[in-house]
Image (cartoon, rainbow, N blue to C red):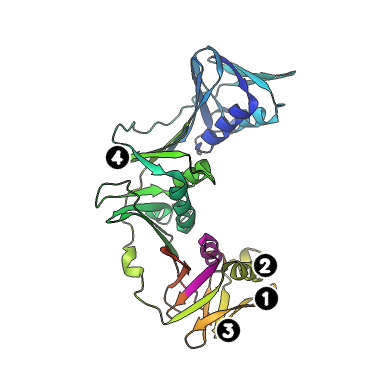
Amino acid sequence: MKFRTERDGLLEALVTAGRAAGSRSGGMGSPSIQLSLRGNQLEVTGSDPDLVIDVRTSVAGEADGVTLAPSRLLGDIVRALEPGTVGVVADDDEVRISSGRAEFVVRVPVGAEISRLSQLDGESITLPAARFAEGLRQVVRAALTDDTRAPQLTGVLMVATESGMRLVATDSYRLALRDLEGLSALEPGAEVLVPARALTEIQRLVGSGADDISLVFRHSELDAVFEVGEVRLTTRLLRGPFPDYQRLLPPSYPYALTTGREEFAAALRRVRLMVRDAKDATTPVRLTFSPEGAELTVLTAESGRAVERVDGHFSGDELTVAFNPSYLLDGIEAIRSETVFLQVIDASKPATLRGEGEDEYSYLLMPVRVS
């Protein structure tokens, strides 16, 4: 294999594909990445058993071929080079990277390999990328990050509805739900459970202000494929029962706080400063509601106490409810509206965050019991 290309384009491909590299290690203690050249088309592939990312990029090709290299090391080398042209030459034993006066020779990892998931040839659906990514931004945050407890909770449930599609995620302490009206990606009545890790990569690939980017989606019973520009992401779907989330949605609430999103979030960030280490990680924030708003209090045995009041309007009797401050802040930050509603039943039942005029998004949060 032999080709020349600009450093920045090669680095972007290596970084994007490298995010799929998992714990499987080749030589030098690093997961491997594959470079495959045909003509002037370079394909860079990173993978683990559940996720594969392929990135296509144009180069000046001189000799076709395929090689493997340690993912992190190769990325670090290319990142450290000066901007400009990079030359890559590879054979069965080593990969040679040169630019200017710098030259690196990296050995091909012994026994390294790339995982491949099934190649899907089914019908493709083109989704509005920016809108889908915004829905993911609001929902993925509620998925479980530790797959040892309940692997199915590390995913986002995509459900076909009568009017479009719904995205749902929960870690059993909170639940995020976003309806995408008029957006159809699944057969009527169908649902798929997509790993949140893969959808986080889709968010990153789409980015912001991406109205002109196309997002192509297709799936089988086992796998799903997303294509964004020159990047193809293939992920294994999750199996197992997803919670019956609809029974968790309260039909009504006797109490509701209306306040400004930025003011609420800023106050929460400040009082949360008292929760500074693992000893205080489970310390809740107490919200004491009154007709004029809410008082936020964080009290820790190690650090001390923080109190701040936010203005607003509270309907109902005075009440104190405690929440995990990080989970509460996640919900506030997911809302786009300048005004948020925190709807409460009592100190032991799920509360719901919504934005003014944003009925398509709900964020449910379990209170924390305090003495």
The amino acid marked with disc number 4 is: Ser
For the point 68% across and 77% down, the residue is: 305
N-term-proximal mark, 3 vs 1: 3
Residue bearing the label numbered 2: 273
Task: Return the mark for residue 306.
Answer: 1
C-beta proximity under 8 Å, tags 3 and 1? no
Badge 1, how many Cα within 10 Å: few under 14, some, many 20+? some
Q: Distance between the residues labelled 1 and 2?
A: 8 Å
Q: Which residue is drawn at 73% across and 18% down?
A: 100
Residue 80 lies left or right of residue 201; in this view the side is right
Q: Earlier in the sequence, mark 3 or mark 2?
A: 2
- In front: 125, or 104? 125
Binning the other alpha carbons within 10 Å of mark 2 as few (below 14), some (14 to 19) or many (20 upward) gives: few
Residue 121 in percent (x, y) is at: 30, 31
The mark found on residue 292 in the picture is 3
At label 1, the amino acid type is Ala
Query: Does residue 299 appear left or right of residue 164 in this picture?
Result: right
Q: Residues within 10 Å of mark 3 (few under 14, many from 20)?
A: some
Rounded to the nearest whole Å, what is the CA distance between mark 2 and mark 4?
A: 46 Å
Q: Earlier in the sequence, mark 2 or mark 4?
A: 4
Marks 1/2 in contact by CB < 8 Å: the verdict is: yes
Instruction: Look at the picture and state if 261 lies above or below 206.
Output: below
Q: Is mark 3 on a helix, strand or loop?
A: loop
Residue 324 horizontal/vertical position (percent): 54, 69
Residue 336 falls inside the magenta stretch? yes
User: 196 above or below 283?
Assistant: above
- Distance from the alpha carbon under mark 4 to that under mark 1: 51 Å
